[in-house]
Amino acid sequence: MGEFMTEEIIIAGFGGQGVLSMGMLLVYAGMIEGKNVSWLPSYGPEMRGGTANCNVIISDEMVGSPVISEADTLIVMNLPSLVKFESRVKPGGRILVNSDLIDKKVTRTDVEVYYLPVSSTAMESGSDKAANVVMMGAYTKVTGFPGKGSVSQAFHKVFGEKKASLIPMNEEAFEKGRALV
């Protein structure tokens, strides 16, 4: 990413697919690496079974606005999200697609696209709830950021003492996601 880095990410999917917590994990990992971060969740009234999304910005500079007009990366977990956000990626940006739930191909030719079977891969780790973490693993492999150590620390921050038992499964899901790329 050269000298200076700003990465703007839109993560979107069904409510309940962990899109907001994926954004939170990326933000914590960014903070651990000393970056400026911003996390802006958005869920409509259609939250259950509807779509949820968040804007995540990780930057070496101060973050001016938490709102992303054009993303460097779009991560989509379901079809309505791909339809809604495909046009909001910068030319030369990237789209990571949960190919288990999205059978449509990305129509744009000016972006890098990764089709990743994250839902079925998560099931191999023991829970389809870990699909977001599998996707995050793939994202870190594609971009080289954030580092594995930072993500591991972020798991401890986000899951805390109460859910510490979930960390090994999530670390496994994260590794499986990296291996998909």
Image: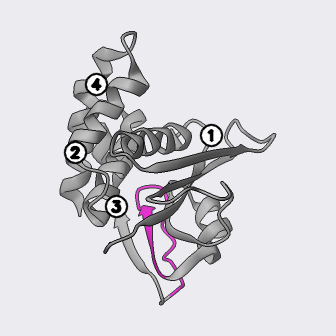
- The reply, left or right, for residue 145 in relation to residue 86 is left
Residue at the (18%, 55%) spot, across then down: 179
Closer mark to the observer between disc 4 and disc 3: 4
Residue at the (48%, 89%) spot, across then down: 110
In whole angstroms, how far apart are the C-alphas of marks 2 and 1? 26 Å
Q: Residue 19: percent from the left, percent from the top? A: 53, 44
Q: How many marks?
A: 4
Residue type at the position of mark 1: Gly
Which residue corresponds to mark 1?
15
| Mark 1, secondary structure of its residue | loop
Q: Is residue 87 visible?
A: yes
- The reply, left or right, for residue 11 in relation to residue 49 is left
In whole angstroms, how far apart are the C-alphas of marks 4 and 3? 22 Å
User: Contact, CB < 8 Å: mark 3 with mark 2?
Assistant: no
> Disc 3 or 2, which lies upstream in sequence?
3
- Front residue of 43/62: it is 62
Query: Alpha-carbon neighbours of circle 3 within 10 Å: few (<14), some, or many (≥20)?
Result: many
Closer mark to the observer between disc 3 and disc 2: 2
Closer mark to the observer between disc 4 and disc 2: 2
Q: Residue furthest bottom?
A: 109
Which residue corresponds to mark 2?
148
In whole angstroms, how far apart are the C-alphas of marks 1 and 4? 22 Å
Which residue corresponds to mark 4?
167
